[in-house]
Amino acid sequence: MFEGMTREEIIAQFQRTIEADVARKENLEKRIKELEAENRQLRRLIGVDHLTGIPVRYRVMKFLENEIARCRRYDGSTFSVLFLDIDHFRKINENLGHLGGDAVLRELAQRLQAALRRYDAIGRYGGEEFLIVLPNTPGDKAILAAERLREKIVAAKPFVYGDKTVTVTVSIGISQFRREDTAPDLIEAADMAMFRTKDRGRNCVEPDSRP
């Protein structure tokens, strides 16, 4: 390959080869970033949270609105809403770092989604908050379902990130649909119930207190 070439020509050829390799690498890295951005945009378009892989807020809200409409069409049909919040999530971030906190959010979302029935709905409502809709589930059964999620799905198995292990607990508020309820009514009632768990020390379930 280098026969008949001077030392300077050989060095120049090596430099051109290295520069070409660097350019190809830079182009590849640029394309990877473009694909990642396109993937994030696609996830947003189809309504999937890019971090947890579960539906985004507006999709679970749409499901909630559809469930309200369905129950209004059929007398006696009801459902419940769970508002779930990770306890002391700031401390988790401080202990594991933000990447570790992200890993906890992903695994928690996967555990919750795997534990729900195929016709239930879950979505990421906020940073460490999740909204769950349980069709054909009155308040008393929703309490049992929420306790199962809290005890057996979340707290029973520690979360591992690298060489660190953390026990995660959640607080869950519950609201049951009434015929006059709107989606905001149900979310507010469940959210308020969740906030009452903080007075009880967190890591518990609180039902709807509306008369």
Image (tube, rainbow, N blue to C red):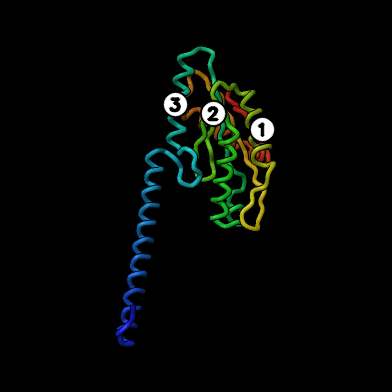
Mark toward the start of the polypeptide (3 vs 1) = 3
Dot 3 falls on a residue whose secondary structure is: helix
Q: Position of residue 118 (x, y in %)?
A: 54, 28
How many numbered marks appear? 3
First of labels 3, 2 by sequence position: 3
Mark number displayed over residue 118: 2
Vertical arrangement, residue 48 with respect to residue 10, above or below: above
Please give the residue where the numbered disc 1 appears in the rendered image: 147
Of the residues shown, which amino acid type is indicated by label 1?
Answer: Glu
Give x and y (percent) for residue 9. Answer: 30, 84
> In this image, 55 relative to 8: left or right?
right
Mark 3 highlights which residue? Answer: 65
The answer to which of 182 and 165 lies nearer the viewer is 165
State the SS at label 1: helix
Q: Residue at x 67, y 47 (%)?
A: 158
183 w.r.t. 30: above or below: above
Which residue sits at x=52%, y=20%? 178
Where residue 183 appears, as percent x and y from the top left, is 46, 28
Q: Position of residue 186 (x, y in %)?
A: 51, 28
- Closest to the camera, between mark 3 and mark 2, is 2
Residue at image position (55%, 41%) is 109
Q: Callout 1: 10 Å neighbours few (<14), some, many (20+)?
A: some
Q: Cα distance, mark 3 to mark 2?
A: 18 Å
Residue at the extreme top: 75
Q: CA distance from mark 1 to mark 2?
A: 19 Å
Quadrant of the rendered structure where residue 32 is?
bottom left
